[in-house]
Image (cartoon, rainbow, N blue to C red):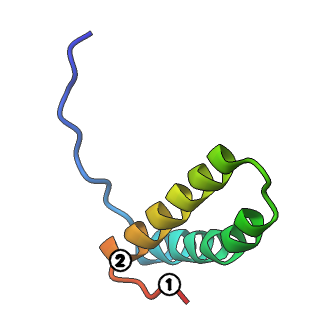
Amino acid sequence: MQSTLTQSPILTSEEIDLLAELLRREARTLPVEIRHTDKRAAREALHRRLLACEALLSKFHLESA
């Protein structure tokens, strides 16, 4: 299948606020999950998810705390 170009979505300020809230919440809970996870691969996956949340917050110029 041929890939197509994707456009950046246009978000309202309310949608951006919601995304920021969800990303912040995820970023706050992930360190606890990381600490309580025994399997190294799972911890690394959670850590990558945390970095992705922080990167998205940064991309949207939103503070992570």
In the image shown, does 22 or 31 lie closer to the viewer? Answer: 31
Q: Which mark is residue 64?
A: 1
Q: Position of residue 10 (x, y in %)?
A: 31, 60
Measuring 40% from the left and 67% from the top, which residue is drawn there?
A: 56
Q: Residue drawn 17% across and 34% down?
A: 5
Left or right, 22 with reference to 58: right
Give the left or right position of residue 48, taking residue 12 as reference: right
Answer with the quarter of the image where residue 22 lies: bottom right
Residue 58 circle label = 2
Look at label 1 and name its amino acid: Ser
Q: Is residue 32 left or right of residue 47?
A: right
Q: Position of residue 19 (x, y in %)?
A: 52, 68
Which quarter shows the C terminus?
bottom right
Q: Secondary structure at mark 1?
A: loop
**Relative height, residue 41 to residue 53 (above, below):** above
Note whether 65 is above or below 39 in the view shown. Answer: below
Mark found first going from the N terminus, 2 or 1: 2
- Disc 2 and disc 1 in contact, CB within 8 angstroms: yes
